[in-house]
Image (spheres, rainbow, N blue to C red):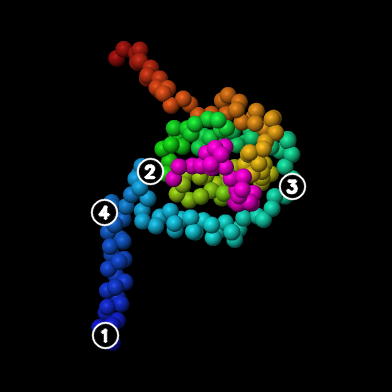
Amino acid sequence: MKKFIFGVIVGLLIPAALGYCYFRFGFAPVATSAPPMPFEEKVARMALHARISKEAPKQAPGQPDEAGFTQGATIYAENCAFCHGLPGQPATLAAKGMFPLPPQLFNKDEMVTDDPVGVTYWKISNGIRMTGMPGFGEMLTSAQMWQVSLLLANADKLPEKATAALVKPGTGAAQPENKAPAPPAKDTKHH
């Protein structure tokens, strides 16, 4: 019996020690350009979906209208476009440097129009750990978060005013990739 208990203890300690060493001695990928750890995406996705299914509102408190879509578009352009993009624009350089890459929410392949609107609301309100997605629950009102959520749920069929609010200059549109940064100003002071 003692050998069995010893075997169980050793069987538990060895994997724990190996896991500790994996992280402690820098073998774990931590750079955004590194490939994910084994099972990282699966475990993170599983935990996220389980939490959202428990907590996400089942329906929006109201119906979308043109004014709400337009206000949602303005809020999105000011707070979300930097990472999640604008219609017809390439991903920003900041977005390309993130891991995981933030979905470009106006790209046909990455739209969340088929997600329940409450799921999008939950993500906006709470954020998602270790992805760069902040929680806006303390920064935006509930009404504003619902406006953005409804905008994204209907991103494939927005009214013209809402679409226009998403392409205004200076609202976070991606910069052209070939634009080099301005050279630093020369120091004109003489020492």
Q: Are marks 1 and 2 in contact (CB under 8 Å)?
A: no
Q: Which residue is mark 3?
A: 62
Q: Secondary structure at mark 3?
A: loop
Could you tell me how far apart the alpha carbons at marks 1 and 3 are, in whole angstroms? 65 Å
Would you call the spot at circle 2 few (<14 residues within 10 Å), some (14-19), or many (20 or more)? some
Range of magenta residues = 100-122
Image position of 99 with respect to 188: above or below: below
Please identify the quadrant where the C terminus is shown. top left
Could you tell me how far apart the alpha carbons at marks 2 and 4 are, in whole angstroms? 18 Å
Q: Which residue is mark 1?
A: 2
Q: Are marks 1 and 3 in contact (CB under 8 Å)?
A: no
Could you tell me how far apart the alpha carbons at marks 1 and 2 are, in whole angstroms? 46 Å
Would you call the spot at circle 4 few (<14 residues within 10 Å), some (14-19), or many (20 or more)? few
Q: Is residue 141 visible?
A: no
Q: Which residue is mark 2?
A: 32
Q: Are marks 3 and 2 in contact (CB under 8 Å)?
A: no
Q: Amino acid at mark 1?
A: Lys
Q: Amino acid at mark 3?
A: Gly
Q: Secondary structure at mark 4?
A: loop
Would you call the spot at circle 1 few (<14 residues within 10 Å), some (14-19), or many (20 or more)? few
In the shown orientation, is residue 163 left or right of residue 191? right
Q: Are marks 4 and 1 in contact (CB under 8 Å)?
A: no
In the rendering, at what x and y percent does residue 4 appear? 28, 82
In the shown orientation, is residue 42 left or right of residue 73? left
Q: Amino acid at mark 4?
A: Phe
